[in-house]
Amino acid sequence: MRVRSKAADESHAFRPSPCGKLPMRTDSPVVCLTVDVETDCPPYLRSARGLDEGLERVLALFAEESIRATFFITGQVAVSHPGMIGKIVSLGHELGSHGLSHHAFDTMDLRTAAQEIHESMNILTGFSSIRSFRAPYLRFPDSCLELLVDAGFSIDSSQARYKLSCYRKPMQTSLTRIPVSMTSSVLRLPGWICRPFLNALSSPVVLFVHPWEFVDLTQERLRLDCRFRTGIPAVGCLKSVILFFRAKGARFVTIRQMGEGGD
Ligand SMILES: [Zn+2]
């Protein structure tokens, strides 16, 4: 049994989170890097360059920096790219569900939502044990929360601290809710702009990126925030973010580790 000193316990003191029941650490930040694995910039593009090229770049960076991350994967991508999903698991990362088809849950009836959730769980459990869920577009109605419990999920990461909906009276649920801290495009801003945003984040910090941000989409007809500094520059940006938090003494964990309080 591991025995911890009183001083060590105090240095890991928690205080309540304003958003959901997850506690926040008051010392060096706990940081979770997550990847929402889907086809390119849904619903605007039909290509899968991120899956074919971008994902490898993210995996290489995480290997170089010894980061274990959480990959939220759609069931359809798990079916179309089983080799890549197997590689993610073999590298020690956590798999979570990002729905089945990447359709927004707030546009579905409950029956369709239940099918999406259960089917994605069934597909992904063929690769790894699954506990964590994140809804596409970070849009997940409270009415669907129990569907996650029924399917065997214990952690939901569909809320966002930068959305007002995160601060509504929380619905009673047995799920641990771990909101994301900031939208992904901010991480691709030049360092002198990005760093003040990172500095303002409270622990636990949950960041997300997509495989398609790591292929060059600058010439695509997309919203500026979806295409600027995509490709190789985005790899450098993510590395800078990792180094920024490492310099602050951050501990990098998966969503599951964060939700279950393990190491
Ligand atoms: Zn998504």
Image (tube, helix red, strand yellow):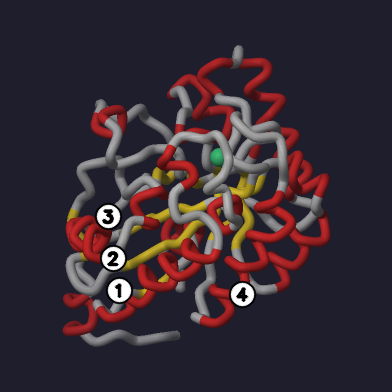
Q: CA distance from mark 4 to mark 1?
A: 19 Å
Q: Position of residue 23 (x, y in %)?
A: 27, 55
Q: Earlier in the sequence, mark 4 or mark 3?
A: 3
| Residue appearing at x 43%, y 66% in the figure | 238
Q: Residue 191 got which mark?
A: 2
- Rounded to the nearest angstrom, the CA distance separating label 3 from label 2 is 29 Å
Q: Badge 4, how many Cα within 10 Å: few under 14, some, many 20+?
A: few
Residue type of the residue flagged with mark 2: Gly
Give the total of numbered labels. 4
Query: How far apart are the two marked residues, 4 and 3, measured between alpha carbons?
Result: 31 Å
Q: Is residue 254 found left or right of 19 in the rendered image? A: right
Label 3 sits on a secondary structure element that is loop
Question: Mark 4 to mark 2: distance in Å?
Answer: 21 Å
The residue at 77%/41% (across/down) is 122
State which mark lies toward you, 2 or 1: 2
Q: Secondary structure at mark 2?
A: helix
- Residue with the most extreme front position: 219
Q: Is residue 131 visible?
A: no
Residue underneath mark 3? 23
**Amino acid type for the residue under numbered disc 3:** Pro
Residue type, label 1: Phe
Q: Quadrant of ligand 1?
A: top right
Residue 124 is situated, as x and y percent measured from the top left of the image, at 73, 48
Is 190 in front, or is 148?
190
Q: Residue at x 33, y 48 (%)?
A: 182
Tag 4: amino acid: Ala
Q: Nearer the observer, disc 4 or disc 3?
A: 4
Closer-to-camera residue (5/114): 114
Q: From the image, tell me which residue sits under label 1.
A: 244
